[in-house]
Image: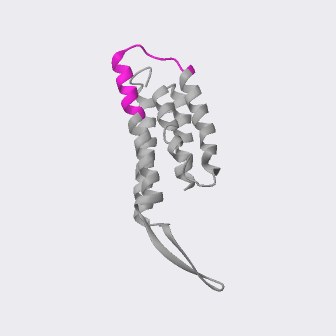
C-alpha cells in the first residue's frame, strides 16, 4: 500500500525534474478519487499533494504546439489510469475474504489483498513510473 500511495509523488518528482506538465497533472488526478476512500475523511489529506501538483503544473512552461498538447493529454490520462488501475486491483478488484484467529474468537475481512492483486498493482505502478521516466529521458515535447 505504501508504494501505491507513494507513486503519485514519485511521478510528480519525475515530472518536476523533467519539466513535464502532463506528468504533474497525471500524478495529481488519481489523488482526487483517492481522497474519498475513507469514510472517516482521513484520506482527504490527498487533496493537499493534488493541489500542489496542479499548482506546479500551472506555473510550468507550456508548449503552443498542437502535437505537444495532444501528447501531453494522452500521457496524463495514461499515467493517471495506470495509478487508478493499481489502486482498484489492490483495494477492490483482487481481494478475498480471510479470517484470522485472535484471542476470544476470529476476525474476518472481505478486503484482504491477494497475491494476484499485488502483482497487478505493482505492474501498473511500474508501467506508470517507466512511462514517466521514458518521457523525461526522450524529451519528446516541451509540454509533455
In the picture, the quarter occupied by the C terminus is top left
Residue 124 as seen in the image, left or right of residue 36:
left
| Residue 51 shown in magenta | no
**Most distant residue in the top direction:** 64
Please state the horizontal and vertical placement of residue 51, each as a whole percent of the image. Answer: 59, 33
In this view, the residue in front, 41 or 100, is 41
Q: Is residue 36 above or below residue 21?
A: below
Q: Main secondary structure of the magenta part?
A: helix
Q: Is residue 72 left or right of residue 5?
A: left
The colouring scheme, among rainbow, by chain, secondary structure or one colour, is one colour
**In what quadrant of the picture does the N terminus appear?**
bottom right
Closer-to-camera residue (135/30): 30
Using the image as rendered, state which of residue 9 and residue 107 is in the foreground.
Answer: 107
What's the magenta region? 59-76
Vertical comparison of 64 with 42: above or below: above
Residue at point 56% right, 35% down?
13
Q: Is residue 52 above or below residue 97?
A: above
Does 51 sit left or right of 123 as displayed? right
Q: Is residue 62 above or below residue 112?
A: above
Task: Give x and y (percent) for residue 128.
Answer: 43, 42
**Residue 12 screen position, x and y as percent:** 54, 35
Q: Which residue is painted at 52% across and 36% down in the image?
A: 28
Instruction: Work out which residue is located at the far front of the displayed protein and give it.
Output: 39
Q: Is residue 68 magenta?
A: yes
Amino acid at each position: 500500500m505504501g508504494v501505491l500511495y507513494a507513486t503519485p509523488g514519485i511521478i510528480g518528482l519525475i515530472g518536476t525534474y523533467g519539466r513535464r506538465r502532463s506528468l504533474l497533472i497525471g500524478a495529481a488526478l488519481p489523488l482526487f478519487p483517492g481522497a474519498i476512500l475513507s469514510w472517516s475523511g482521513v484520506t482527504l489529506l490527498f487533496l493537499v499533494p493534488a493541489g500542489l501538483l496542479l499548482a506546479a503544473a500551472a506555473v510550468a512552461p507550456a508548449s503552443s504546439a498542437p502535437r505537444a498538447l495532444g501528447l501531453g493529454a494522452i500521457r496524463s490520462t495514461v499515467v493517471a489510469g495506470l495509478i487508478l488501475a493499481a489502486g482498484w486491483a489492490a483495494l477492490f478488484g483482487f481481494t478475498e475474504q480471510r479470517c484470522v484467529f485472535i484471542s476470544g474468537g476470529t476476525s474476518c475481512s472481505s478486503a484482504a489483498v491477494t497475491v494476484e492483486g499485488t502483482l497487478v498493482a505493482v505492474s501498473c505502478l511500474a508501467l506508470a513510473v517507466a512511462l514517466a521516466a521514458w518521457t523525461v529521458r526522450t524529451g519528446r515535447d516541451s509540454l509533455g
